Amino acid sequence: MSIRIKVAKTDKELSDVYRLRYQVYSDHGYFADKYDGAVVDLYDAIPSVANLIAYSDDVPVATLRLNRDSALGLPSDHAFDFSGYRQQVTEEERVAGRGAPLFSSAGMLAIAEEWRNRRYVFGGLFRMAADIGHMWGVTHIMATVNVTTAGIYERLGWQRLADPVSIPALGVEILPFASAVEPMYRWAFGMFKDQRGLLDHFSGCFQWYLVDGGKEIFRQDETGDEAFLITKGSVDIMRHHEGSDRTLRLAKLGAGDMFGELSLIDSSPRSATAVASRNTELVVINRDVFWEKSNEDPQRLKDLMQILSGRLRDANNLGMIYACGSDDERLAYFTERVRHAAIPDPRNPEVLKSRISIEEFADMALVTAEQAERHLANLQDQGLLEFTARQITFFGGETK
C-alpha cells in the first residue's frame, strides 16, 4: 500500500479536499447541517492558501490546510485570540534584530477513519506543511486543535498557549498551539544536511510518498521521471544480472539518502530496482519540475551536480565497506551515517534523534541484531548515545 501527498491544484483535487472534510467532520457530527456535501469557506478562496491532499490508490484519505497571514487574518484567529502571542513574537524578533515575523495557520485537518491511527499519514502532511511554510518565508505557525489530538502537537514541540476553550456550536474543546517554523523545518528535513541547497531551491515543489515495507518504488529497466529522498525508513537498491539469473543487493539506504536522481537528467531506463525494506517516507521531485526550476536559476542545476558527485563518492565508500569491511568497521561506518542523518530534537536542538530500530541498523551493517546491540551498548556506556528498540539518540560528536 502507498500514499501520495501533494498540493491540491486541479478542480478534482480541490473537490476531493472539500468533500473529504465533509465526510470526516459529518461522521463526528460537525457541520452536517451547515454544508451540503463539501466544507469550504472564504479562506479557501484567497491566494495565500495551500490545501494538502493525500491519496491511496487515487482515493483521498487525508487533507490539511495552510494559510499565510493576510489582511483577513488567519482562520485560527476566529477560534482563539492570538494577538498576545503575535505581539510577544513581534517584540522577540525586534529585540533579536530580525525583521517582522510572518505568521501562518494550519487547520482543516481531516483524516479518513481507517487512516487515523497511522502516524506516518499525519507526519507526511506536517513535513509537507513545513516545506510550504519555508517556501512562503513564514516564521511562526498557529493552530487551534481538538483536545483529542493535542498530544501530537506537544510531541512536535509546539507551545500550548492556554487551557482548553469550549466551542459550544460544535460541542468540542480546542487548544491553541503555536510554533516557530524553523524547528519544524529541522524536524522535517534535518536528515538532509548534504542536500540543503537542493531543498531550498525546490521548496514547495515536492510531493510525499509513503510506502509499506516490501513495496517496489521503481523497477530495473523501466523509465522513470522522479528522484527520491528518504526521510524515514530504508530502501534496498538491487540489480538483476540476467547472465547468472542472480539479484544482487547494491546498497541499503536510510534517512538522509537520495536515489533515482539520474532520472532527473534523462529518460534512460532505471539501472536498478528500489524496494522499501520497511515502512518508508520519501520526498519526491519530478523531472519536469526540476528542469522548469533549473531553467529559472542555473544554480539549481549546479547544486544537483554537486549532490551527484557526492553520491558517487559515497557509493564508492559504501561498496568498499560492504566488500572489504569487517563487522566492527561496518558498525562504526553505519553508526556515523545514522548520526549524520539524525535530526535535532524539537525541544533540545543539541540532541540528535534517529527513528531507526536495532533490526534496521543491524540489517544496514550486515550483522546480527545481537552484534548491533552490543556495539550500541558500548557507545552508550561511553555517554555518546542512548538507544531503545526503535530509536537512537546521539549527544553530539562523532561516534567512530
Image: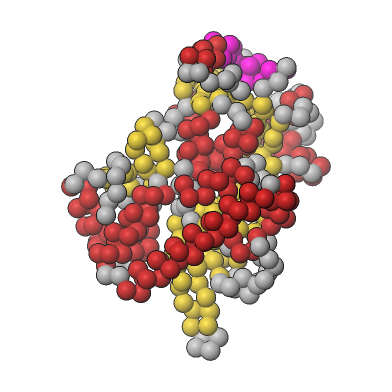
What kind of colouring is applied to the model shown?
secondary structure
Q: Between residues 163 and 368, which one lies in front from this camera angle?
A: 368
Q: Is residue 254 magenta?
A: no
Q: Between residues 339 and 84, which one lies in front from this camera angle?
A: 339
> Among all residues in the image, which is located at the extreme bottom?
243
Query: Residue 146's x, y, as percent?
Result: 55, 25
| Residue 356 in sight | yes
Residue drawn at x 55%, y 25% is 140
> On the rendered structure, is 197 left or right of 11?
left
Q: Between residues 273 and 95, which one lies in front from this camera angle?
A: 95
Residue drawn at x 43%, y 68% is 316
| Residue 109 in sight | no
Query: Residue 267's x, y, as percent?
Result: 69, 67
* Span colored in magenta: 72-86
Q: Quadrant of the C terminus?
A: bottom left
Image vertical order of residue 6 relative to residue 163, above or below: below
Q: Is residue 83 magenta?
A: yes
Residue drawn at x 34%, y 59% is 334
> On the rendered structure, is 30 left or right of 276?
right
Q: Between residues 48 and 6, which one lies in front from this camera angle?
A: 48
Query: Residue 182's x, y, as percent?
Result: 50, 32
How many numbered marks have been drawn onto this rendered protein structure?
0
> Among all residues in the image, which is located at the extreme right?
11
